[in-house]
Amino acid sequence: MPEILHPDQVETGTGLAAESAIRSYAVVGLGNPGLRYQNTPHNLGFLVVDRLAERNNIRVRTNEGVTLTGAGKVGGYDVVLAKPQTFMNRSGASVKALMQSRRLSNRNLILVYDDIDLPWTALRIKKKGSAGGHNGVKSVISEIRTDAFTRVRLGIHPGTAVEDAADYVLAPFERAWKEELDEMLTYAAEAIESIIAEGAIKAMTRFNRRARGLQDEEE
């Protein structure tokens, strides 16, 4: 795998990691394979990758080891879209293999996933950080040996008490959420397109929100 770079290099624009120098990206959505999990909160990462693929005429159909991938252009940049097929808790093995085969480093990675610590329809772009209790993210950090990569966190907390988080994230979406889910997928795809075209810092100011219709304060 190419050199792992410290996040400060990316943010200050020093060295090869300056955002403006990045010409290719791997957008990886986290989820679980199989029809059983297809329309569940834990598969939001997969659903966003599908929406991004649809918007940019990319087919995510290639079996690349333990990952479904599709390559194309987003805003003039080379992009590979990926959905690990290893199940959530082993996502890191898929991400590491993809990055090695494509000769990408952590600065090229955009990880997309659900976050039960954020309210439903919230979106948060960050350039580094811990796994926050998300086993898929924990696996990725462990395998690529850094938490310095851009991530798009998608809020799934329903606003009421969740007795069993594991059951909740693997249960089908409520029918009443269909319209909001569709808006959220498009909004997240637009946010990723902004990251690719303008960089994560500018995308944060445009797309971070506490919930649908409520923009985030500057962090």
Image: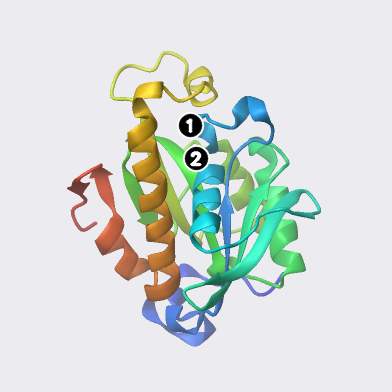
The label shown at residue 41 is 1
Residue positioned 46% across, 55% down in the render: 151
Rendered location of residue 23, percent (x, y): 54, 80
Mark 1 vs 2: CB contact within 8 A: yes
Q: Nearer the viewer, residue 179 or 194?
A: 179
Q: Residue at x 35, y 50 (%)?
A: 124
Task: Name the residue type under label 1.
Answer: Pro
Instruction: Please tell me the numbered disc located at residue 167.
Output: none
Residue 217 % position (x, y): 18, 53
Image location (x, y in percent) of residue 138: 58, 43
Residue 44: image tag: 2
Can you say which quadrant of the picture contains the C terminus?
A: bottom left
Q: With 58 as the anchor, is 208 left or right in this view?
A: left
Instruction: Return the x and y of residue 88 as percentages of the image width and height.
Output: 63, 37
In this rendering, the answer to whether 38 lies above or below 63 is: above
| Residue lying at 69% horizontally and 57% vertically, measured from the top left | 69
Callout 1 secondary element = helix
Q: Nearer the viewer, residue 20 or 67?
A: 67
